[in-house]
Image (spheres, grey):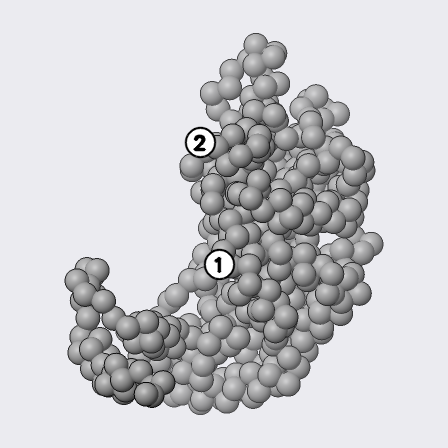
Amino acid sequence: MTDLDSSHIKLPPVFTQRGEATSLPRNEIPEGMLPAETAYQIVHDQAMLDGSSRLNLATFVTTYMDKEAKLLYAQTVDKNMIDKDEYPATAAIEDRCWRMLADLWHVPDAGDTIGTSTIGSSEACMLGGLALKRHWQAARKAAGKSVEKPNLVLSTGVQVCWEKFCNYFEVEPRWVPVTEEHLFLDGYELDKYVDENTIGVVAIMGQTYTGAYEPVKEIAAKLDEIQADTGLDVKIHVDGASGAFIAPFCQPELEWDFRVARVASISTSGHKFGLVYPGVGWIVWRDQERLPESMIFHCAYLGGDMPTLALNFSRPGAQVLLQYYQFLRLGKEGYRAVQQGCLDVAQYLSAAIADMGPFELISKGDTIPVFAWRLKKDHSDNWTLYDLEDRLRMKGWQVPAYPLSDNLSDVTLQRIVVRNGLSHDLATKLLADIKTEVDFLQQLDGPMPHEKRSASFHH
Ligand SMILES: *Cc1c(COP(=O)(O)O)cnc(C)c1O
């Protein structure tokens, strides 16, 4: 008698099995089965062709967590966030997490605030926008006025989720253009955009294009003036996808959060500088009154009476546990260390890139650890930032070039997002690679052949 399983012995070696040595249908579910090992190997190997996430300097989303977090993730991957009756401990942790954020963002009354986790900032922004819309509708109806034409005031430099919000929920976007003088929403001429149909104003803490903070306090002061002149009381939603996890630790004096009385709600991405793998986001409202009761559903079929506030139903619960893990593991001290480390690397990189000669910085990475640059106006036409993007991609780095928004779309920027995991050491290697490629492009005596150029766009 032997304990060797002979069917296993007869299995051909890896890479010679059906599916690996033969082709599988691409767009139909195969008729037959594969051994688990073979299926694993095939999927694993195809995913290898994706770029290395750590070298992707386009994304804001976490690509590094430590091994205890990975272990926790693997152990809790089956938890469904919506099953609050089945997973009451996870539900309680979700509650604790948004309360911690409410506290971090200086909510005036911890007993009267409300919040939730979401799948990311996009869903959180949809909920924030909807609450503004519902509020406006209720007030208009109570005054016997029309609710036909809601509008939302925002910069053309907002993230695409706000275009989605306006499109999906039928709100007119009142775009405030970005100009060379006003690269972000700063309150300038706000009175031209706000009227009785304005449901709110969006302020971005950490603009996608440049990393800039929109000055929430100044925007609020402008809205105070507007209220004094017209009686319109317009609230602010702060889209703090990145900055709401940076400013509290690294720019604590900056007043952008619930310390500003006009701020009704704040959203953020747990999976950006919240330092959790995708996808988790958060939203907190100043007080319960700011979240209309009509947005909360009571659902009985999971057991118990569960209030739910979300666009999705089922969604992973593990990310919420990972957020709690990071809060405990890092504490404020740890978050400050990680975020300040990223800011230091960003400013080290931006200073060196400014020194190379052909570039002009648009931002230097002193708000969120994100910065962008453009070619100097008198630079040769032989190459563009898209060429530099392509050259760097050949070395494994993804450093996206993209047009600025709207009426500045003829300006091309290139941007680096410094995340936890882009160490000073790795940044030095990146600089050497940028230098090599810039030298190559600078010595061209004619234009780069542009039909080969890729113009990918990243948010
Ligand atoms: C990333 C981002 C979003 C969207 O966030 P997701 O978490 O990816 O859904 C919204 N607003 C801003 C400013 C962002 O940077």
Amino acid at circle 1: His
Q: Residues within 10 Å of mark 2 (few under 14, many from 20)?
A: few
Amino acid at circle 2: Glu
Residue 136 against residue 208 in the figure, above or below: above
Judged from the image, the secondary structure of the residue bearing numbered disc 1 is loop
Residue 287 against residue 327 in the figure, above or below: above
**1 or 2: tag closer to the N-terminus:** 2
Residue 76 against residue 91 in the figure, above or below: below
For the point 54% across and 79% down, which residue is it? 358
Q: Which residue is most to the front?
A: 1
Which of the numbered marks, if any, corresponds to residue 150? none
The Cα–Cα distance between marks 1 and 2, rounded to whole angstroms, is 23 Å
Residue 46 lies in what quarter of the image? bottom left
Q: For this rendering, which residue is in front, 165 or 187?
A: 165
The CB of the residue at mark 1 lies under 8 Å from ligand 1: yes
Residue at mark 2: 170
For the point 45% across and 81% down, which residue is it? 396
**Image location of residue 78, percent across then percent down:** 49, 56
Residue at mark 1: 459
**Image location of residue 72, percent across then percent down:** 60, 64
For the point 76% across and 33% down, which residue is it? 112
For the point 71% across and 73% down, which residue is it? 341
The CB of the residue at mark 2 lies under 8 Å from ligand 1: no
Left-right relation of 347 to 429: right
